[in-house]
Every structure is written in structure tokens, then in C-alpha cells.
Image: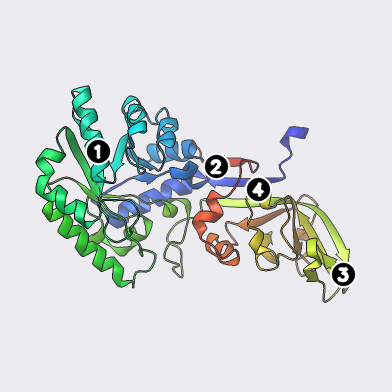
Amino acid sequence: MSDLEFEAARLTVRLGAVASNYRLCQRLIGPAAVAGVVKADGYGLGAAQVTRALAAAGCDTFFVARMEEGVRLRPVVPNARIFVLDGGAPDTIPALLSHRLTPVLNSLAEIAGWSAAARETHSELEAAIHLDTGMSRLGLPGEELSTLAREWKKRLEGIRVVLWMSHLACADDPAAKMNAMQLDRFRTALAMLPPAPASFASSGGVLLGKDYAFDLVRPGIGLYGGNVQNAAKNPFAVAAVLHGRVLQLRRIEKGETVGYGATFRAKRPSLIATVALGYADGLMRAIGNRGAAAIAGKRAPIVGRVSMDLTTLDVTDLPPAALSTDADAEFFGDTISLEEAAKAADTAAYEILTSLTPRVPRVYEGAA
């Protein structure tokens, strides 16, 4: 092995699992179409690689957040439709047009700007229009929806609406009353507007059932293995596994401390594994003295603080045969779920994935 082949840490991305999760969404929600949400660099897994795998599985529609993400994605899927959730701010319109990106228009002002671009280019321009049904983030609020419903022939001049869309606030909780409330609001809004395909559900909405499907669903975290509704058995396959290399094994006596601030004091003679993964890699500092990692499928508590480059585990109770200075410690994946890692950090699975920095190499399995 050369010097450059040493991997202190790695994120293994199972592209076959991503494709399998996409097909699961198709089975759950058909005949509605399934798009792939690949914003934030494919939720940290690598947008280009994930997009290729989804395209090979039949996906022809993708969602990104930023215009720049769409520009980078266009060469990967030259013929796919790419929606940009951030909308169509005036200074993004030239790039949206030149890279054939479809904006999700979030206000009457953006609709007016896109209509003006259609006039200037003497063409009909495609767009999605976002209707706010309760998130109070992006999307047309109620008063703007009412205006559009009255004046849509004039305001949509030059625009071909290819999607009416909204977004569920509580889809991760199937018992939340807000789901049904938003569904009713979305149906009411659609009845006020000219016919076009509609999209309402992300990963959690897919699991709510076909009432939420409409014409297109747009899963994100589910594609990447997230247990979006915290089900007893996650319906989505594990798509990402984070490992760090054990650099050293050290025996300490009862009463000795570990790490900055001496926040862990051994209550017995202990064996400590120092792992090459820290907050500079995107590991959450909050998991110190709270979270766990796994070696050879056996859990070991994280002891002491997570530092910039290193994390320490108490491996006293692990089988000696599993322990060596080239062993891999899994921080999430097959043994430690994304949700368990997130709970230890008091955050969400989304942040666990998207916080991983470029210092962690992505290793792809099952590349399309």
C-alpha cells in the first residue's frame, strides 16, 4: 500500500442501495412518478454519483436547492428535468435559461420575472410553482395564491406550469393532524388553478400513502437510507456507512481521564481505542460521552470529547480478536443507525449526512 492509499476515514456509499430505495418508492407510490432530490451534494453522498445511479434506475427528474447545484448537475444528466427549489431570482435567470434548469417559483414577483424572461426570449418557459400550505417558508402565501387564482391567465403569460407543488411540515409523524390539514389546503389550491401535474410528498409523504402522492413524489433522505418515520424496521436500505481507522489502543487504570477537559474518568481499568475521525471531518462534537461506534458489529461507547481529528472509544468489553490498530470503527451504517447517531448528537439524520466534510473520502460501491 502506498502512502496515498492510507485511509484514516471513509464514507462508503452504496449506490445499489440508493437505487433500491428509489425502486421502493416507486412500488409504494405508483403510478405516481418518483423524482430524486440530490441537493446539498446528494445529501453529502456525492450528487454526481448518486444522480448517475438514479438515472440508471430510470429516474429522469431531479431536485436541487441552489442554481449552482443545477449547473453542476446538468452535464451529468443532459436530458433530465432539473428543478431548482430556490426559485428564479432575477440574477439567476440567465444561468437558468442557458443550463435548461426549471425554477420552482415561490412568489408572484418571481412569476412576473419569469414571465418577463419568456417575453424577452420570445419563448414559452417551463416552471414549477410552489404553494405554501403551512410551512411558512418558501411558496406563495394565501393572499398571493388568491391573486394568482383570479389573474392566472395574465400572470402566467409565457409560462408553462409543469408542476404545482407544496411541502409537508410533519410528514415524519404519520399521526400529526397537520398532514391532513395541509392535504386539504393543497387540494383546495389546485381546484383554484389551471390543471397541471402536482407534487406534495417527500420521503415522509411517500410513507403516508397514495392520498399524498398526486403525480410526482420527491424523496430525499429515504433514498439515502434515513428512517424518516422512525419505524421499528426501517423500510429503506442502508446507503451510507461512516468508518474511522483505529490508530492506537491504550490501557488506562481506574481513575485516569480521557481527552480534553478530562470529561471522562475511568471507573475500572479500561482499554481505549483512538480513532481517526473528529469534528473536522464533520463528526458531531455533541456525541462525546453520549454516542457510540461499532467495531466488528460490537458497540463501544464514545468516551471523552470528540476533538478536531480524533475520537476515543471504550473497547474494554469488545472481543480482543476484533481489536487492532487497523480496525474500522463504524459511526453510522449497519450497526449504528443514522437516527441513533443523530439522537446522540441531538440533531437530525439530515445534518449527520450533510455535515461530513471533503476530508472524508467517499468510496462508491455498485457504481452505475
Amino acid type, callout 4: Asp
In the shown orientation, is residue 259 left or right of residue 177?
right
- Judged by depth in the image, the label closer to the viewer, 3 or 2, is 3
- Three-letter amino acid code of the residue under disc 1: Ala
From the viewer's perspective, is 111 left or right of 60?
Answer: left
Is residue 156 in view? yes
| Label 4 residue SS | helix
Task: Tell me the CA gap for discs 1 and 4.
Answer: 38 Å
Picture disc at residue 365: 2
Residue 132 placement: quadrant: bottom left
Q: Which residue is mark 1?
A: 127
Mark 2: amino acid: Glu
Tell me how far mark 1 sits from mark 3, CA to CA: 63 Å
Image position, residue 320 (x, y; %): 80, 63
| Secondary element at tag 3 | loop
- Residue named by callout 3: 256
**Label 4 belongs to which residue?**
281
Q: Nearer the viewer, mark 1 or mark 3?
A: 1
Q: Name the residue nearer the viewer: 90 or 24.
A: 90
Going from N to C along the chain, the mark reached first, 1 or 2, is 1
In terms of sequence position, does the residue under pointer 4 or pointer 3 come before the other? Answer: 3
Q: Residue at x 31, y 57 (%)?
A: 28
Looking at the image, tell me whether mark 1 or mark 3 is earlier in sequence order: 1
- How many C-alpha atoms fall within 10 Å of the one at disc 2: few (<14), some, or many (≥20)? few
Q: Residue at x 37, y 60 (%)?
A: 204
Task: Say which quadrant the N terminus sits in.
Answer: top right
138 left or right of 224 in image: left
Quadrant assignment, res 134:
bottom left
Q: Amino acid at mark 3?
A: Glu
* Cα–Cα gap, marks 3 and 2: 42 Å
254 versus 151 height, above or below: below
Instruction: Please report whichever mark, 3 or 2, sits nearer to the chain's N-terminal start.
Output: 3
